[in-house]
Image (cartoon, rainbow, N blue to C red):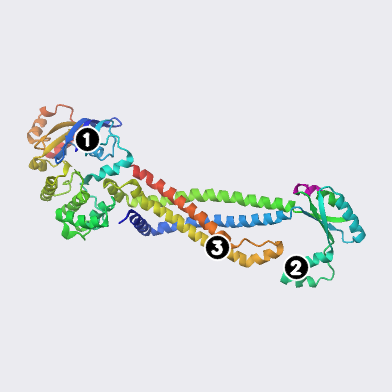
Amino acid sequence: MIEFDNVTKNYGGNTGLNNATVHIHRGDFVFLVGPSGAGKTTFIRLILKELEPDSGTITVAGKDITHLKRREIPHLRQKIGMVFQDFRLLEKKTVYENVAFAMEVVHKSKKEIAERVPYVLNLVDIADKADRYPHELSAGEQQRVGIARAIANQPRVLICDEPTGNLDPVTAMDIMKLLEQINIRGTTIVMVTHAKDIVDRMGKRVVAIENGRIVRDEEGAYGFIQEDEVKNFSHGNLSSYDEGLSFDYLEEVEKYV
Amino acid sequence: MSRVTYSIKESFSQMWRNKGMYFTTIAAMTAMMLILGLFFVAFVNVNMFTQEIEKDYNVIQVYMGEKNDDVANQEVQQQLQAITGVDSLEFVSKDQALQNLKERWGDNAYLLDNLKTNPLPDSFMVYVNDKDSASTVANQASSITGVDDVVFYQDTIDKLAKVTHFIEVGSMVCMIFLVVVSIIIVANTIKLTVFNKAKEIGIMKYLGATDSFVRAPFVLSGMFIGLFSALISTGLIYFIYTKIIEVLGTDIAKIVSVSLVPAMDLVGFILATFAGLGVGIGIIGSFISIARFLRK
């Protein structure tokens, strides 16, 4: 579904992504973890074609997008649903209108919109608040609307950029259950997160990025900042990360100490 | 909802939300079109006046001295005929000249009835073969004894040509100014609207909206600014010009025997030109303001 082969992207001397190779298959649920500035955002922006890679090839839904023409980008993005940490709902539109908006901008018919919007609102369990405005909703409810909007056009891939970042742990788990349901229905999900507990509990595939490199790609736990490693780190002995540690990484460690 | 209705609806709603700003923009553009339009109206009239006069370009009027009798007139006539380039002559007696003037003044001719003596001299209308020889013929005619004054239209036409040229240059400067300033004003107005909708545009792009779809409402708003300005300014020009014709038109006709160009003849052209100009400016202005935004 998403294939990165030896992809490198530099920003004027700073490494965004360094020779990264990741294959995400159809129906996968993948966590993208790593310290801030490690290259997670670069990874997502490359998928969305907001950035052009310096080298390597990127394929999304069977199409090589490495040198995609500008006018073909909208078509690519219609295959990808985006869920944001800050929800990014339009304040002046109701829940219903926010979801319908996603379909309007890609020229879906009135009939399609009238059928699909109630269906997805029901799916994310927010149908009873269809006429409310975003500011009248809790954070968790707003994120449900954000997810409803992202899946309105039946994308092949859902990219979630820290979708639980603004949510309390209980609400976050509800959102994770919702994403899992969507995944079970066949949508590939790539989720960027710092939430170690969530990653550990979900037990899905984890791709870890650090300094632009893919440092780990396996099923299971967050793995990045295990408590024993933090202990080792404080003793100046962090065997699993003997490559240079970035300042961001230190910050990340401190969060968990 | 179809793309077109969506774009039109969006464009009107964003204009309504920023109505103060859009009103100011339309007012500024209208003012500039108004100035340009009045220049144009003046130009058309002077131009027509010049053309009317050029028709008489091959005529030289030779006025006799007041005391000339028939014998003297005949001598002058013979000498005039001898000048190379003269095609034919027509004698206009002083009585005939007064009659002609009365005809031209029409209802106001009674003013001439009070004259005790006829102040008009005898004259010859000298027709020349070709317009270029008019000035040499006029020179030679004025040196004949018994000839008091020679009038031909070269001077007038030269002066009018200068006026026409001035108006032309003025219109061009005005036009360039109008276009540049309007583009800047429209671009700024649209840019502020774009900033107001930055979040919405960002989301639209993530959702896979095409550039042209994102751009459409803004371009339409720009076009509407141009179109409204064209309509209002053309209406104002029509109003002002018909007033001018009402006040001056008939009097001018008496004095120079040329009437002003009818307002209706000009309105269609002005409206079409301004609408085209306005819409063009709107499109360019809005494209400029959203281009950088879309590239992000």
In this rendering, does residue A237 appear at all? no
Q: Give the foreground label among 3 and 2.
A: 2
Between discs 3 and 2, the one toward the N terminus: 2
Number of residues whose C-alpha sits closer than 10 Å to that of mark 3, classed few (under 14), some (14–19) or many (20 or more): many
Chain under disc 3:
B
Q: Position of residue A246 (x, y in %)?
A: 19, 31
Assign a secondary structure to mark 3: helix
Quadrant position of residue B35:
bottom right
Residue picked out by circle 3: B238
Q: Position of residue B63 (x, y in %)?
A: 83, 58
**Is residue B246 shown above or below A214?**
below
The amino acid on which the numbered mark 2 sits, given as a three-letter code, is: Glu
Cβ–Cβ below 8 Å for labels 1 and 2? no
Q: Position of residue A208 (x, y in %)?
A: 15, 34
Number of disc labels: 3
Say if labels 1 and 2 share a chain: no
Q: Position of residue B104 (x, y in %)?
A: 74, 66
Location of the C terminus of chain A (image quadrant): top left
The amino acid on which the numbered mark 3 sits, given as a three-letter code, is: Tyr
Residue picked out by circle 2: B103
Residue picked out by circle 1: A39
**Does the magenta run of residues contain B189?**
no
Rounded to the nearest whole Å, what is the CA distance between mark 1 and mark 3? 65 Å
Q: Which mark is residue B249?
A: none
Quadrant position of residue B12:
bottom left
Q: Residue at x 45, y 58 (%)?
A: B228
Q: Is residue B148 left or right of residue A211?
A: right
Rounded to the nearest whole Å, what is the CA distance between mark 3 and mark 2? 32 Å
Location of the N terminus of chain A (image quadrant): top left
